[in-house]
Image: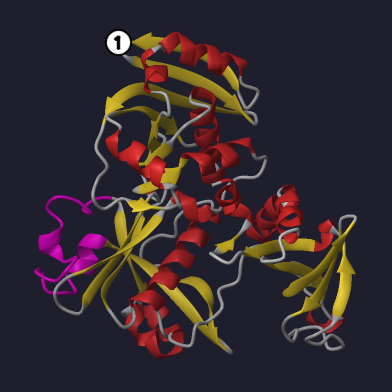
Amino acid sequence: MEKPKSYMLAVPSQPRDIEDPQLLLDRLHTTGAFQLLSEHMEEETLFLEINYNGELYSAEIYPLDFTIPELYRCQHLFPDVDVEAVQTAQYGLAVVLEFGKNPLVSYHLQLKLIYALLPDVLAVLDDSSEKILSGRWVILAAQSTVPPAPRYLFTAQAVSGEEDCVWLHTHGLNRCGHPELEVLNSNKETYQSHYNTLETLAYRLLEADSTPEYGTPFFLAYVAQGIPLVVTLIDWEEAVSCYPPDMLGGKNDREDGHNEDTCAVFVYPTHESAEEGNYSSLAVYDELLAQNPIYMFSTSETLRMKALATERMEFLYQAFSDKKNHLLVKIGLLMDKKHRTDSNDREHIWFEVTDIQEGRITAKLTQEPYYIKGLHEGYVGAYSPEDITDWLIFTPERRITPDDVYILSL
């Protein structure tokens, strides 16, 4: 079976770099980020075989002229000078990678490959997810031992027309070995809660070994006390047959795209409906979804976030020295015994940082815990970096997370 491919285009700060294949090869041979097993040229394309963390990957590198597509989403903050340089650039370096068994690891390797080729990359157009990435973010992510957040693997777009109808769909999941996801016939009042459901389902699929078969029930979350949200995937051709053909995202919208390897999200509101295969629109949950249900992070994502927060703790320390900044840290505290499970024994709670001395952080609890009876809002404690699972920096201008600390260098 052919492996899915991820397509990115790197915009160089120095355009002449992509004109010299030998320079690019020399950089690849000296990188310590991965092992280059073989390379060969065919016309203008450089074909690579790479060993990364014990898995073999194939890549293709070639120069390409480009213009920025209108619908691409700018994922990051760019200084004005960078924006101007990207808009006036005419040539980039296409970096195509066959994804391996772990999409997030594969994505991280692709960023490391770009950084090895162009160590001062200006920006990256992630064609597979229709995103524009800051070169400064790419450099920081490539230098990290921790993969970026799963949300970078895909984009969820909300397309609206002149009427109330909104069509939600993803780009990027195909390269991860999954179909793209859609929500049909949403509207301008409910699309944000549908968007959250779509995004959460995408996260779950990215951690799954395989995609659930179309029509099978898939438990996603509890949207209220004891009320499960059970979704199912329906092939797009069957899904659009449930709606008028001229609806936004309907059959007549499929001639030029969104007509292969994509499926729509529906729900089974009852156990009986799941047994009988009688699926319904996500809209049947609108009243509950409007109450902003909490979608929990998986254990693996919590560990990834903690690893990145720990790796970049020095940025938090630096930010504390500027008294205009406001800092929060998330601490994983041991739950009361009756609430612990085999897979989870910690409640992750936000604290406000009041002091940092010799690496230890003094912080005040900002909320009432759910699962720790003897702890209350306002409690002050001292914690080590190992206790922290996430952090936030609020500057006078914006909020900064461990993922986007590149902003501090602007």
Determine the main secondary structure of the stretch shown in magenta: loop
Residue labelled with disc 1: 43
Q: Residue 205: horizontal and vertical position, in percent?
A: 49, 58
Q: Residue 409: horizontal and vertical position, in percent?
A: 58, 46
Residue displayed at 52% across by 41% down:
136
Question: How is the protein colored in the picture?
Answer: secondary structure
Residue 89 seen from this side: yes
Residue displayed at 87% across by 88% down:
374
Q: Which residues are magenta?
A: 236-260
Q: Secondary structure at mark 1?
A: loop
Residue 4 seen from this side: no
Q: Residue 308: horizontal and vertical position, in percent?
A: 68, 51
Residue closest to the eye, 386 or 168: 386
Quadrant housing the N terminus: top left
Give the residue type at disc 1. Answer: Glu
Q: Compared to 154, does 124 lie above or below?
A: above
The answer to which image quadrant residue 355 occupies is bottom right
Residue displayed at 30% across by 56% down:
262
Magenta run includes residue 257: yes
Mark 1 Cα shell of 10 Å, populated few (<14), some (14-19), many (≥20)? few
In the picture provided, is 361 more to the left or to the right than 160? right
